[in-house]
Image (cartoon, coloured by chain):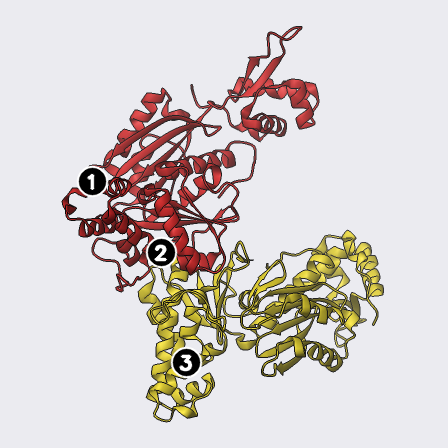
Chain colours: A red, B yellow
């Protein structure tokens, strides 16, 4: 399919009709119903729908053939009139999702980043195979958003110690070879908090803190449906807080802050090894979780220790923001209910007003789902009739 | 003067003319100039001004009599058409300001709160003598806002450990005996941050943290000109952060949090006494500041110690919010540039993105000025033609 006509949607009647068709999860509607919902006359609706069909935004579908009389013709938004591309360009994996214009996932690709490489090495290939798998032409992708670790200000990665030397410029260049649409780059935790608010753990929350807890530690902050990025795009970088374990405030050679070093995946594995006689069998956080599930006391103690440290690091964030909800995400949140309960209990003793603490519903898809959401927001802001944005 | 007619201002022409007259600090304008600025015809402006004069909102003043020809008649907003009342009901003092509708201070009253009493004991008398001094009838006060210590949610003081037993209900009752207009109650630090943004240190800042540093420690947070109050009105209560000095997270009998206990006025005085051979001469923070100015090493060391502790407590706030500016206010900020420099240096080493740290410009008037601002906002929202609110 070639690029479809978007100018049409700026015409009021076509825009009004399309907005009505996109509501209710894109259900098919009779033209008489569309007339009622839009307040436009039946003939005006008919002309608008015909034009939207010609332009590729709307299709006619047959009504219920078992009902008496001639089946009515229904109009339906073509959610596959275009696509959006969301990418999580993490330090260890690239996860890409192609979604239709209703936000439904059409295809997913996931590729590990080879050791000593960055996402740059694989992101182009991931996009190529994603589009090939879905059978979608690059020209039908209407917008793209990317989540990346580090501080992103005005779309530029200005500080990404976990991925030395890479820049958003290089990333955007790789993508721009394939896509001639806007490409946004955002901090990964910021995308994750948008995703949890959109369709995850925080659907009803007003002030939300998403904790990206894995190799690194960062938070994304949503206040009244607006991302709080801060004066330098550095809001939520609590991994640099000093702790009793790491008093040195400056980031080490590996670019990790004191709190990150105290609670991250490496800290968990090292603690579990110290506590266990056969420490060598523990190589990854998943090993610690598995051992704890089997009742291993050392693994449990290691999880307990990082949970207590995390709660101490989160307490000032909760005291500062008084959020409705804190969502624990990232690889270490996969320890599940046990770690959740421990962090929750500790946090309750360290804060003044209670706040809900929940596990991420979206798991390691949170960043990519947030990227899809922002790409959809971009399509809606630039091309489709207006609706409220989430960022 | 009896209560003036406000319904008139909802009429579009009168509202438009009054808005034009209130701009430029309420300068007097010729009717021809008003016609140009409003886009209304000269006769329409004339009718509107006459009606506003009759209603008491506008007055005619004589133009420049030395210019050739007949002096033009100028119209001017009567900023004394009504008044607003701002009150800082602190634990130790009640400070009240009566301001006109341009925000200019008309009268100020300040009364110490007697030992073992609360602001409740004196606030009624302060308001009575303020109005008497100004010669303003209570019926000409159009709105009132009060700043109080503690957590204020939906206008109710829900947690005010420094003023045991008092409630916003009692406070509002005392004021409602005198005023039959809306009475708002807000957290003191929240009012202070609004004031610094309005006419203090943070006029150009987008995200601002005001640190109320005295007997207690709290912060007011402004994000994009909106107060961030949090889910329970408890945002900014960082005094409850644990510290190396006070690991116990719960508030003590006196209701002070760990960080408050480590950095407040009492801590400063106690440290200075420890360091000085003649410790008994030190009774109040002002004594410590005076001794430090005279070169006393012990006093300097005490100020240094609380400054370092405060910076450690503020670092997670700065990491979380990445503000443009942090404003140091409250009694301990009166130590001045020396303490500012020390906190600034420490904070720079503990945070990732630099943020401006400044002393309060409004000093101990910050809370009452913020109260005046919110009372003006209320008058503008309810009675005057619309303009953007600051909260």
- Mark 1 surroundings within 10 Å by alpha-carbon count, few (fewer than 14), some (14 through 19), many (20 or more): few
**Foreground residue among B139 and A339:** A339
Is A348 positioned to the left or the right of B115 in the image? left
Chain that bears disc 2: A
Residues under labels 1 and 2: Cα distance?
A: 26 Å
Residues under labels 1 and 3: Cα distance?
A: 52 Å
Residue corresponding to mark 1 = A117
* Placement of A21 over or under A167, stated as above or below: above
Residue A225 placement (x, y as % from top left): 51, 46
Chain that bears disc 1: A
Q: For residue B352, which quarter of the picture?
A: bottom left
Q: For residue B168, which quarter of the picture?
A: bottom right
Instruction: Name the residue located 35 percent from the left edge and 50 percent from the top edge.
Output: A218
Residues under labels 2 and 3: Cα distance?
A: 28 Å
Is disc 1 placed on a helix, strand or loop?
A: loop
Q: Which mark is residue A238?
A: 2
Task: Identify the image quadrant of the N terminus of chain A.
Answer: top left
Q: Which mark is residue B261?
A: none
Depth-wise, is mark 1 or mark 2 nearer the camera? 2
* Placement of B367 over or under A276, stated as above or below: below
Residue corresponding to mark 3 = B268
**Foreground residue among A388 and B267:** B267
- Mark 3 surroundings within 10 Å by alpha-carbon count, few (fewer than 14), some (14 through 19), many (20 or more): many
Is disc 3 placed on a helix, strand or loop?
A: helix
> Do marks 1 and 3 share a subunit?
no
Q: Earlier in the sequence, mark 1 or mark 2?
A: 1
Whether the residues at callouts 1 and 2 have beta carbons within 8 Å, the answer is: no
């Amino acid at each position: 399919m070639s690029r479809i006509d978007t100018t049409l949607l700026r015409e009021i009647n076509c825009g009004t009709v399309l907005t009505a068709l996109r509501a209710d999860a894109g259900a098919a509607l009779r033209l008489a119903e569309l007339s009622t919902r839009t307040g436009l006359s039946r003939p005006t609706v008919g002309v608008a729908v015909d034009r939207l069909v010609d332009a590729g935004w709307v299709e006619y579908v047959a009504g219920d053939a078992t009902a008496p009389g001639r089946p009515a013709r229904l109009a339906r938004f073509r959610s596959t009139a275009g696509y959006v591309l969301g990418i999580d360009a993490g330090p260890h994996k690239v996860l890409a999702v192609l979604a239709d214009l209703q936000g439904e996932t059409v295809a997913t690709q996931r590729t590990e980043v080879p050791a000593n490489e960055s996402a740059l090495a694989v992101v182009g290939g991931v996009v190529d195979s994603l589009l090939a798998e879905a059978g979608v032409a690059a020209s039908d992708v209407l917008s793209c958003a990317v989540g990346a670790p580090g501080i992103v200000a005005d779309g530029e990665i200005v500080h990404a110690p976990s991925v030395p030397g890479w820049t958003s410029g290089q990333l955007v260049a790789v993508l721009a070879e394939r896509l001639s649409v806007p490409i946004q780059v955002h901090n990964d935790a910021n995308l994750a908090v948008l995703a949890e608010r959109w369709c995850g753990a925080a659907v009803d929350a007003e002030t939300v803190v998403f904790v990206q807890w894995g190799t690194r530690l960062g938070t994304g902050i949503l206040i009244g449906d607006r991302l709080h990025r801060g004066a330098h795009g550095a809001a939520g970088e609590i991994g640099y807080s000093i702790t009793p374990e790491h008093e040195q405030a400056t980031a080490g050679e590996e670019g990790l802050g004191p709190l990150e070093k105290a609670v991250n995946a490496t800290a968990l594995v090292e603690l579990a090894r110290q506590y266990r006689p056969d420490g060598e069998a523990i190589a990854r956080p998943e090993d610690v979780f598995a051992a704890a599930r089997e009742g291993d006391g050392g693994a449990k103690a290691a999880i307990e220790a990082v949970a207590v440290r995390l709660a101490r690091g989160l307490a000032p964030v909760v005291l500062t923001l008084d959020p409705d909800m804190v969502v624990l995400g990232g690889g270490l949140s996969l320890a599940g209910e046990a770690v959740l309960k421990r962090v929750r209990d500790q946090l309750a003793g360290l804060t003044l007003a209670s706040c809900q603490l929940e596990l991420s519903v979206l798991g390691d898809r949170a960043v990519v789902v947030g990227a899809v959401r922002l790409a959809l927001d971009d399509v809606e802001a630039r091309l489709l009739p207006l609706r409220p944005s989430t960022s």
